[in-house]
């Protein structure tokens, strides 16, 4: 989508008969820009500033510098949430991308029923995460839930899904994987179907095995799509709230507190807006940092090699 | 000679066909497993919603419901009075879609056609806004709307969703605007059409699929939202269906049957759009590759 800007710079040099003046442009854009300024940018700036104050809606809000940030960064609960977030993001993104790619490659053929399958794959990513949360809470119910019932059927021991700290985090990851793997499949399928055919045919002629073709040709060609998929999932896992809220509300004992859930609890249960705002900005900073690594590290390596 | 040639040639296509079949079986198996895992949790949700309460709380679990009944759906509306939540959700989602597009279409047009100083800054801001965790926005909006006395009104939700969904919609529409050839607009304008008329009568119809895609995406993400509604509303005056789902948990213990029925109701718009507007949805998801 970058060409938009480039076109404007290079293509618009010639005199257009149209009154494409910048004044008119701003006139057309101003309603949207003003709404975003008032309801997005102003509140975000306000809470960023307030994250340096003791902000608890009690009226007086003394300036405390970076107090909220240092409290949280060295606090036990924040570090638990951070650890949960790291485990949740790394495991669910890895499973979603790897499984998504595997399924996309497997079903990337002219099979009967592909249209129907692709339609069905659209459903999980587009239904409310709140419904996904409640549904998996029901499936993982230890008394009447289906999953434990199936385990019993095969004489396996029950698993205390949502009542046990580790299993609760596993359950939340399972729900997230169920909802978002199909999105990865759709993205990768779109990528696979726009791949150039010549290199693949050439490799087949040269006697490459299917695995070699995938590893040395398909995967490198799919790199841009994989990067976009990773970027989307990183942004989204750092915002995950709904699924967790309906399944565990961050429990048991904070074992499924992700950064957004923890920030919500601070603001609306502890009524400590200063700390909550600080946590939400730390979460944003971290997702920006991870995205920076994602794009920066390959760039640095490429630069090193060039020298 | 000819017979020998035929005989010697025959096995080759046969072998190839068999190899294809083996691979195809594997592919179908993978496809079937994927579809089963995708669909099953939703089927289970539906099955739970048509069970009687006694059947839901039976051990061992019956996979197939003993009887199909609509009592859970009746209790969703009669006992839990869910109609209010449904109306709020519909009002908020529809108003958000309309407002977002009234604002986003001219803005995307301006950004794609007019040489505006500071356009790069606007693009940058749009990109960053897509990454902001919703909670970072919900916290100050609570304080701001409290100051204006807008808390617990549908207006708080409509305004905040409109602002939150604008960057994604503008970004999506920009992509479609680029594909409209400028010559058409130039012809319209030399015939005396003004900027607004060109946009409404020439450009907007040409990017109708793009508007459709962004409308569907905006609608579903607003319909599905829990976090903003949870923070900005506190009573049935403005609460939406996802918040209603959380009330099934806290207020009444957990009524799994009614909760599943409400969950099924929540999924209906998604199913409708997936069935009737699949192309628009895929376009919206893969063009912008966006969420939230």
Image (cartoon, coloured by chain):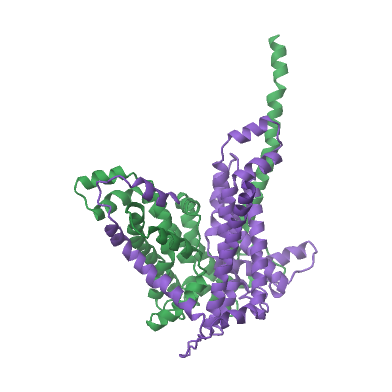
Chain colours: A purple, B green
Label tally:
0
Q: Pick whichever, A251 or A148, lies toward us.
A: A251
* Residue A212 percent location from the top left of the image: 70, 40
* Residue A233 percent location from the top left of the image: 58, 60
| Residue found at the very far top of the displayed protein | B1
Q: Can the viewer see residue A245?
A: no
Q: Can the viewer see residue A194?
A: yes
| Residue found at the very far front of the displayed protein | A307
Q: Is residue A60 above or below residue A268?
A: below
* Residue A69 percent location from the top left of the image: 58, 79
Q: Pick whichever, A282 or A197, lies toward us.
A: A282
Classify residue B208 as left or right of residue B281: left
Q: Pick whichever, A34 or A10, lies toward us.
A: A10
Image quarter (top left, top right, bottom left or bottom right) of the N terminus of chain B = top right
**Residue at point 69% right, 29% down?**
B16
Classify residue B141 as left or right of residue A16: right
- The quadrant in which residue A176 appears is bottom right
Q: Is residue B70 above or below residue A184?
A: below
**Residue at point 58% right, 39% down?**
A110
* Residue A174 percent location from the top left of the image: 66, 63
Classify residue A182 as left or right of residue B115: right
- The quadrant in which residue B5 appears is top right
**Residue at point 39% right, 83% down?**
B147
């Amino acid at each position: 989508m970058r060409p938009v800007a480039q076109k404007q710079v290079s293509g618009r040099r010639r005199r257009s008969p149209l009154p494409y003046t910048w004044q008119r442009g701003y006139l057309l854009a101003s309603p949207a820009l003003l709404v975003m300024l008032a309801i997005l940018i102003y509140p975000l700036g306000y809470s960023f500033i307030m994250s340096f104050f003791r902000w608890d809606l009690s009226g007086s809000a003394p300036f405390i510098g970076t107090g909220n940030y240092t409290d949280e960064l060295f606090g036990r609960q924040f570090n638990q949430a951070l650890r949960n977030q790291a485990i949740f993001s790394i495991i669910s993104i890895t499973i979603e991308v790897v499984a998504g790619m595997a399924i996309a490659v497997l079903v990337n053929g002219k099979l009967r029923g592909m249209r129907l399958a692709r339609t069905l794959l659209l459903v999980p990513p587009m239904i409310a995460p709140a419904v996904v949360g409640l549904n998996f809470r029901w499936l993982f119910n230890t008394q009447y839930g289906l999953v434990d019932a199936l385990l019993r059927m095969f004489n396996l021991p029950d698993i205390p899904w949502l009542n046990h700290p580790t299993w609760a985090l596993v359950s939340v990851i399972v729900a997230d994987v169920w909802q978002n793997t199909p999105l990865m499949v759709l993205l990768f399928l779109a990528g696979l179907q726009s791949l150039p055919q010549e290199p693949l045919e050439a490799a087949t002629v040269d006697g490459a095995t299917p695995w070699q073709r995938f590893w040395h040709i398909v995967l490198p060609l799919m790199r841009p799509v994989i990067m976009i998929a990773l970027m989307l999932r990183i942004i989204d896992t750092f915002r995950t709230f709904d699924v967790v809220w309906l399944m565990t509300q961050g429990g048991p004992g904070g074992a499924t507190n992700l950064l957004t859930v923890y920030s919500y609890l601070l603001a609306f249960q502890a009524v400590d807006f200063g700390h909550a705002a600080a946590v939400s900005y730390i979460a944003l900073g971290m997702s920006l940092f991870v995205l920076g690594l994602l794009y920066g590290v390959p760039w640095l390596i490429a630069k090193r090699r060039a020298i | 000679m000819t017979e020998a040639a035929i005989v010697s040639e025959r096995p080759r296509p046969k072998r190839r066909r068999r190899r294809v079949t083996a691979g195809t079986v594997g592919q179908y198996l993978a496809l079937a497993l994927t579809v089963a895992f995708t669909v099953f949790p939703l089927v289970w949700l539906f099955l739970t919603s048509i069970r009687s309460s006694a059947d839901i709380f039976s051990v061992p679990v019956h996979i197939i419901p003993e009887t199909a009944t609509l009592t859970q759906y009746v209790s969703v509306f009669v006992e839990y009075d869910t109609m209010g939540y449904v109306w709020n959700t519909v009002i908020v989602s529809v108003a958000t879609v309309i407002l977002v597009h009234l604002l986003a279409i001219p803005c995307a047009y301006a950004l794609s056609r007019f040489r505006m100083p500071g356009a790069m800054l606007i693009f940058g801001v749009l990109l960053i806004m897509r990454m902001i965790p919703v909670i970072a926005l919900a916290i100050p909006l609570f304080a701001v709307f409290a100051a204006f006395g807008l808390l617990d009104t549908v207006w708080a939700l409509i305004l905040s969703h409109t602002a939150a969904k604008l960057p994604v919609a503008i970004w999506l529409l920009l992509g479609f605007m680029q594909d409209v050839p400028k010559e058409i607009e130039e012809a319209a304008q030399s015939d005396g059409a003004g900027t607004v008329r060109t946009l409404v009568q020439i450009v907007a119809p040409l990017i109708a699929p793009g508007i459709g895609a962004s409308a569907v995406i905006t609608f579903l993400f607003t319909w599905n939202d829990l976090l903003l509604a949870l923070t900005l509303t506190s009573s049935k005056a403005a609460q939406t269906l996802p918040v209603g789902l959380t009330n099934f948990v806290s207020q009444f213990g957990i009524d799994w049957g009614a909760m599943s029925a409400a969950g099924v109701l929540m999924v209906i718009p998604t199913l409708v759009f997936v069935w009737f507007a699949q192309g628009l949805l895929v376009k919206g998801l893969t063009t912008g590759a966006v969420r939230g």
